[in-house]
Every structure is written in C-alpha cells, then in structure tokens.
C-alpha cells in the first residue's frame, strides 16, 4: 500500500495496475465476501452478542417474542398507548426490560427515583440518533430536538417567550379565538332538535392553530374560517392522522435513516406537509425581520426596547439581539426556523388534543355531574374574559385540567439512549431473574430507555386502584396519592410535561390556553356522546388522536360530540 502512495503520476499507477496479480472477477468476489462477512458479523453482534452481554439481561420481563426483527414492539403498537407497559409493570414490577428492534433490550421503569435520575441527567440520556433524525425532518433543529450545550443555549434564549408576564399579555388572543369556536358551534345547533354534532378534533385543532399564529407570530392563519381549504391546517391534519396498522418499514426508517431512501406513503405525506410548514415559517421570519429592519431605519438603531410586538417571535428575536450577547450564543437562522416549526406543530396540537380529550371525558354519561359542577363554577365569574388570576383561583377547573392531563397524556412516551455506562438507583427494590434483590440497575452505553408517560400517570401504586378512572375529586384528597410527590414531573406530580432540565418549556402557556378554552366552551354549552356512541380508539403519531370506524368499515380520525346551548332543552 505504501508503494501505491508513492506513485507520482497516472502512468506509474497504470503500470502497477497491469501487474496486479488478481483479475476483476477475483476482486469482485473478495469484495463481496468482505461485505458479506461484515454484514454477518454486525447481524450476529446486534441480534446475539449485544443482547446477551447487556447488563439488562437479568432484569425481569416478557419472554415470548412477537417478531425476531421487532421483538415485542408489534404488540405494543397494536394496543392503546401505555396499556402493554401497564400490564408488564403489574406482572414484573415497576422496573423491567423487553426487546425492541433487532432484539435489542429496552429498559423501562415507573420507579420515581429512577425517573428522577434519568430526567435530571439529560446529557447522559439523550434522544437516540434515529429518533432525533426523524424529529429533525419534522421539527427542524429546534429546542425540542437539540441536545447538550446546544439545547441549553437555545432554551436560555427562548425562556423569555414563556414567562408569566408574557403569557398574560396573550390572553386576549386566547379568548378571541376560543369565543370564535364557541360561536361557530352554537350557530350550528339546529332550531328543531336544539343540538348539533361537532367534530371536536378539527374544531379545536384549527382554533389552537389560529391562536399560535397570533400569539406566536402576530399572524392570523384564519384556519377556523377557512376550514379544510386552509393549506397549513390541512398539512397538519394529514401529518398527524394516525395509522391504524403497524407499518414496519416506516418504523424501521426512524431507527435506520438510510432506509428513508425507500419511498413510502407516510414519507410522502411528511415531506409534503413539512414543505408547507417550512414555506410558511420562512415567510413569517422574513416579514418579521423586515418589520424590525424598518424599525431600525426609523429609529436609527435596533435597541432592545424598540422591538415591538407581544408575539413570541418578536420576543424571541428581542432575546436573540440582546446587547452583549456573543455571536456563539445567538441562534442561527436555521435554529430560528426550528423554533417556529416546533411552535407551529407541537405548540398547537398538544393543547388542542388535550382539550378535546377533556371534552370527551365530560361528555361521557358517568361524568355528567363533573360537567355540571364545572359549569357551575365557571358561571360564578361575572367577567366575560376573566384574568389569569381569576381562572387560576377556580379549584374545580384546576382539578379537571390536572385529571385530564394525567389520564389523557397526548404524548404517551419518551425514548432515550444511555450515552455511557451508568448505575440507576431504585426506590422500590427489584428481584432479577436470578432471584437477587437489587436496589439499582446497571445500564450499558447504547441501551434504550423507554419512559411510558401514560403508564406512569396511571400507575396504581401511585394513584390508587382507580388510577385509570377520570376522577377530578382525587385532587382534593392528596392523602389518597401521597407518593405522587415523588414523581419528578414539572407539574403537579404528573409526567405529562416530563421533568428535569428538558421539561416542556411552554407548559404554562398550554395550561392557561386550556383554561381559557374550557371557560369559553363549557360555560354556555353542554356536551354528550352521540346515540349510539362510536367506539373511540386512541392512536398515536406525534400525539394521541381519536379514530372511529365508519359504517363501511373505513377508519377516520374524528371526535363526534353532541353540543347544546345551556338552557335549550338541557
């Protein structure tokens, strides 16, 4: 090889090649054999050596595989979010392992001490590369995707966007759009029957899209009025429509990005939807920068105090142009685009889905008393647009919101990967397969860590035997769930907004937006289920959405609710 490197011209190389002792066929065979040997070694290493040597191998967990390629994942996907993990926790205890892609071992725990360790050592437990690559395709390199120092830098700049004072300034927007949806539903009520069937999924999704447009960018997307003709609303609806069958290739593409070269229908929808989002986002940035440049020309300098606008993008640009901020501390244009995409998608769909599931809970016959009590409390406020303090002072509204977020977490799980060998402490001792009692678990670099938010929020050892039941009364009886104080969630002992340094940066925004929506939609309307009621399946893509089966057997993402104006035959 060294002699080859010494050749100084093409002629000498050609002479060397002519004297090469092997013909093309022999080279091709040797190359193919080398590639085959490498693939075979990687397959043996992935399917047999790594799982066998993993320190997780002695943890309790299910044995029978669903697939030699996907381990236990098919049964997890086929069931509602969190159900299989709840069953395993009941059978094997709060800490267990199961098999994922290529029979890799996944660590799963509901143990509060273990959760606290994992969430508060976020640099040691980042998102897996495949998951992060998939998120980058959808959200860009924003705060939700960034890791380590990059995440801390972005979060520091974004924090002012979600302060209490900033959110308070946005309340008129929350009310205006919430009342617009209320009036649309009221106007759809038949004079003859005194009721109407509405699709709460689409109505709330378009409302919160309009809210984030105005609150985030001072731009009215007008999705509520335009409905299905609204380009952005349609793009998000297609992107978030849950699949009803297990798409193996699409699932593997998240783990192995190279497989993304194989075209799929889901990939086509994702690319089409994100092209719309990217175009809209860049337009918003360009218009905002143009406005700020005009202000700079008018004022002769771009001072921080001169950056007008109460929308989040204005505040973000304001924070990113703080005097004295080093260039290395500022966001790039691509990072700014990542924040916009994150706010557009995650910032509107999580709140709309959470509120939709809340209305669904209230509409159930067994929860009529809850709905009536909530309406009575809301009716006590004389103001058409109560202040933040007035809404936060309503105890039953607070309890209903907390219970909905506990039972109906719209992001059902998070997945992490150990960046180094580690020891995870446990609050509840675990008995391994060898009968040894352990107070900690060793985990190896590269091992997957799966945190089921749904299972943790409905853990019977924390919340009692009725943990799966929607019961706001539990929040007035903290003695019934004292261990919830051990949960490291940033909000009220539930994991919906997770915890640690990567907790949801916009959770205060989401809570207040939900309270305004509930105030506007429940005070003057009642909700019930159609008769006969549809069977509602809860399916997840990015968030949990409802799926019903139509008369012809086809599936549709839809949430049918019957609304009545209070006082009209109610």
Image (spheres, rainbow, N blue to C red):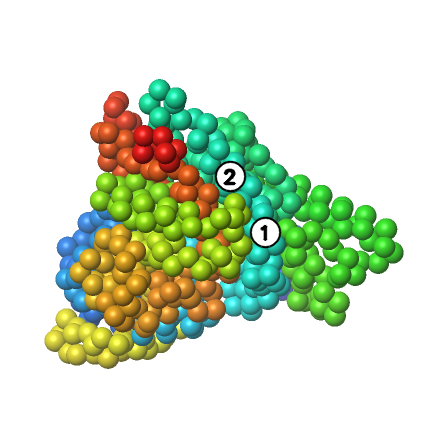
Q: Secondary structure at mark 2?
A: helix
Residue assigned mark 1: 170
Position above or below: 9 against 328: above
Q: Position of residue 342 (x, y in %)?
A: 53, 50
**Which residue appears at 24% of the width and 35% of the height?**
535
Q: Secondary structure at mark 1?
A: loop
**Which residue appears at 63% of the width and 51% of the height?**
311
Side of 503 where 463 appears, left or right: left
Q: Position of residue 305 (x, y in %)?
A: 75, 61
Tag 1 or tag 2, which sits nearer the N-term?
1
Residue in front for this viewpoint, 103 or 61? 61
Position above or below: 564 against 8: above
Q: Position of residue 500 (x, y in %)?
A: 44, 69
Q: CA distance from mark 2 to mark 1?
A: 15 Å
Quarter occupied by residue 16 = bottom right
**Which residue appears at 56% of the width and 67% of the height?**
152
Residue in front for this viewpoint, 391 or 338? 391
Residue assigned mark 2: 179
**Which residue appears at 66% of the width and 67% of the height?**
329
């Amino acid at each position: 090889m060294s002699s080859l490197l010494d050749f100084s011209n093409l002629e000498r190389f050609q002479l060397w090649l002519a004297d090469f002792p092997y013909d093309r066929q022999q080279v091709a065979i040797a190359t193919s054999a080398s590639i085959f040997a490498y693939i075979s070694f990687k397959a043996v290493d992935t399917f047999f050596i790594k799982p066998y040597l993993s320190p997780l191998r002695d943890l309790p967990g299910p044995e029978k595989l669903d697939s030699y390629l996907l381990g236990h994942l098919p049964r997890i996907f086929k069931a509602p979010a969190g159900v299989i993990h709840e069953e395993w926790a009941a059978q094997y205890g709060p800490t267990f392992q199961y098999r994922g892609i290529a029979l890799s071992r996944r660590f799963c725990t509901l143990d509060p001490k273990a959760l606290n360790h994992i969430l508060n050592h976020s640099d040691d437990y980042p998102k897996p590369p495949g998951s992060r690559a998939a998120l980058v395709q959808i959200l860009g390199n924003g705060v939700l995707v960034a890791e380590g120092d990059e995440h801390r830098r972005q979060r520091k700049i974004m924090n002012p966007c979600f302060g209490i004072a900033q959110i308070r300034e946005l309340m008129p927007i929350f009310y205006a759009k919430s009342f617009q949806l209320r009036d649309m539903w009221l106007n759809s009520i038949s004079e003859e029957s005194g009721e109407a069937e509405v699709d709460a999924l689409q109505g709330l999704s378009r409302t919160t899209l309009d809210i984030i447009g105005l609150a985030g960018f001072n731009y009215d997307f007008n999705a509520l009025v335009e409905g299905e003709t609204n380009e952005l609303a349609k793009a998000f609806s297609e992107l978030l429509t849950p699949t009803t069958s297990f798409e193996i290739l699409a699932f593997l593409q998240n783990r192995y990005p190279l497989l993304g070269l194989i075209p799929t229908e889901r990939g086509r929808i994702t690319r089409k939807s994100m092209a719309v989002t990217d175009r809209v986002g860049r337009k918003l940035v360009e218009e905002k920068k143009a406005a700020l440049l005009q202000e700079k020309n008018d004022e002769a300098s771009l001072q921080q105090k001169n950056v007008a606008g109460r929308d989040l993008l204005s505040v973000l640009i304001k924070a990113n142009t703080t005097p004295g901020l080093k260039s290395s501390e500022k966001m790039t244009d691509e990072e700014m685009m990542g924040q916009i995409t994150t706010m557009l998608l995650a910032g509107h769909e999580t709140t709309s889905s959470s509120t939709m599931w809340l209305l669904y809970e209230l509409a159930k016959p067994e929860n009529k008393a809850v709905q009536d009590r909530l309406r009575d409390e809301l009716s006590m406020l004389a103001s058409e647009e109560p202040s933040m303090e007035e809404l936060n002072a309503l105890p039953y509204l607070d309890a209903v919101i907390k219970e909905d977020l506990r039972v109906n977490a719209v992001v059902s799980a998070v997945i992490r990967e150990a960046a180094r060998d580690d020891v995870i402490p446990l609050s509840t001792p675990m008995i391994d397969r060898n009968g040894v009692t352990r107070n900690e678990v060793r985990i190896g670099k590269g091992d997957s860590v799966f945190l089921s938010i749904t299972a943790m929020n409905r853990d019977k050892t924390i919340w009692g035997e009725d943990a799966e039941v929607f019961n706001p009364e539990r929040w007035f009886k903290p003695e019934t769930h004292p261990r919830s104080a051990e949960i490291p969630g940033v909000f009220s002992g539930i994991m919906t907004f997770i915890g640690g340094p990567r907790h949801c940066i916009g959770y205060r925004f989401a809570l207040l937006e939900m309270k305004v929506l509930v105030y506007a939609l429940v005070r003057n309307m009642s909700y019930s289920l159609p008769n006969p009621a549809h069977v509602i399946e809860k399916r997840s893509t990015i968030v949990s959405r409802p799926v019903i089966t139509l008369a012809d057997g086809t599936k549709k993402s839809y949430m049918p609710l019957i609304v009545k104006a209070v006082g009209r035959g109610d």
